Image (tube, rainbow, N blue to C red):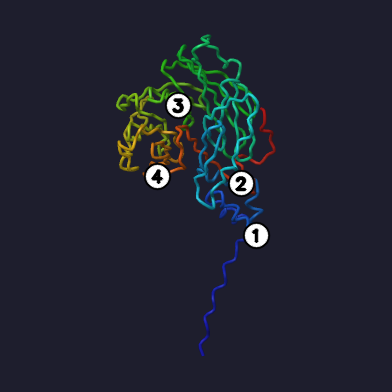
Amino acid sequence: MTEGRTSPAPASLPDDEDLLREILLRLPPLPSSLPRASLVSKLWRRVVSDPHFLRRFRGHHKTPPLLGFFFMDKAYVPAFTPTLPTPDRIPAGRFSFPPRRPGDCLHFFECRHGLVLLIDNRLLKAVVWDPINGRRCTIAFPPEMKMNDRHPHIKFDMYTGAVLRDCRMSAFKLVLVLSNTLFELAWVCVYDSESRKWGDIISTVIPDSTSLAQPSVLVGSALCWVLDLSGGGILQFDVDRQSLTVTQMPEDIHVTDDSHVQVSRTDDGGLGLVILSERRIQIWGSKAISDGAVRWALKKTIELDKLLSLTPSMETRPPVMLGVDEDSSVIFLWTTVGVFMIHVESVQFTKLPEDSCIRGYFPYKSFYSAGLGIDGGDDRAESFDNA
């Protein structure tokens, strides 16, 4: 009589908390990862709910996932559209902007590090909103940045800005930029939410054609804006060095009045450009060579008529670039046949819900796990309202 083989005992779950933390730390940073792990046992839930572990989790992964994008709806209220598949898909209503206050005239400017920046050009204030926890901070412009061009019938002042923070912390910096094409000057000032104070104002000369209408892109420690939709140069504010400079558009990059230019960040963290001309997208990258000089090179060309099967007969209006995700090389593109999210590296695309309007699309990235308190900041109690 032969003995039957016994099945191996099932592997036991690790009960060493230090080992368990190191294992869970390497879970993908998707919304469902930690909630699913928390269902395994009380020990696992205690570990993934620990504030210190959550800070390490964010620090380990560094770049949060792309949860979706915002755009301004017809009522001029920020609306969220999720892009992740189930089970990581965030319900659109989860990130609802708080009711507008009387007199608000807010315009959406950008998303970064889990925060949203809106600016009220009429009341001269900025609103920094955290969609994860719903908190909003309203900040009045410094008096020195409330310019008056003394031409009541023609407005020369234009505001833009940027928001940034360490994703492991809740404190943030607001960078406010004021440009005036009459004086051909741009000014920048930084607000620190920890001190609740504005810093010194820095200025530089700009061309009279400047129109800072696009979101910034963070390249290293520098925030970058194209001076106008057709290029014209790049405005760069180095947050660490507190310097404001203008970089001219490279001579070997040819753009026309119909081109649409957006600053981007290259794979190696350098300064790049995305140029849309008719039905062609060009991806350019730069490399510092010496004494501040930069060499530009064409990295990739995407023919939209081949990728999206666009033909001249289908188009009543040319494609429009709606936004660029600075971290993942994703381009949002409006065409007469729909809005597309194009992944530059893989040259794959996703068609987004139908939208007949041409408006900005703002990619939103954050660490988020429902029910575990992962809110993109640290877990200290802090007032985030009306700084």
Query: What secondary structure is found at the residue carrying circle 1?
Result: loop
- Give me the C-alpha separation between circle 2 and circle 3: 33 Å
Q: Say above or below: 8 vs 249.
A: below
Q: What is the x, y in percent for residue 347?
A: 36, 44
Query: What secondary structure is found at the residue carrying circle 2?
Result: helix
Which of the numbered marks, if any, corresponds to residue 54? 2
Label located before the other in sequence (4 or 3)? 3
Return the residue at label 3. Answer: 225
- Give me the C-alpha separation between circle 1 and circle 2: 18 Å
- Pointer 2 and pointer 4: residues touching (CB < 8 Å)? no
Which of the numbered marks, if any, corresponds to residue 41? 1
Q: Is residue 188 left or right of residue 283?
A: right
- Give me the C-alpha separation between circle 2 and circle 4: 33 Å
Label located before the other in sequence (2 or 3)? 2
Q: What is the x, y in percent for residue 286?
A: 36, 32
Q: Residue, x 38% and y 31% (percent of image)?
A: 273
| Amino acid residing under circle 4 | Phe
Query: What secondary structure is found at the residue carrying circle 4?
Result: strand
Return the residue at label 4. Answer: 349
Label located before the other in sequence (1 or 4)? 1
- Give me the C-alpha separation between circle 1 and circle 4: 40 Å
Q: What is the x, y in percent for residue 274?
A: 38, 33
| Amino acid residing under circle 1 | Ser
- Give me the C-alpha separation between circle 4 and circle 3: 26 Å
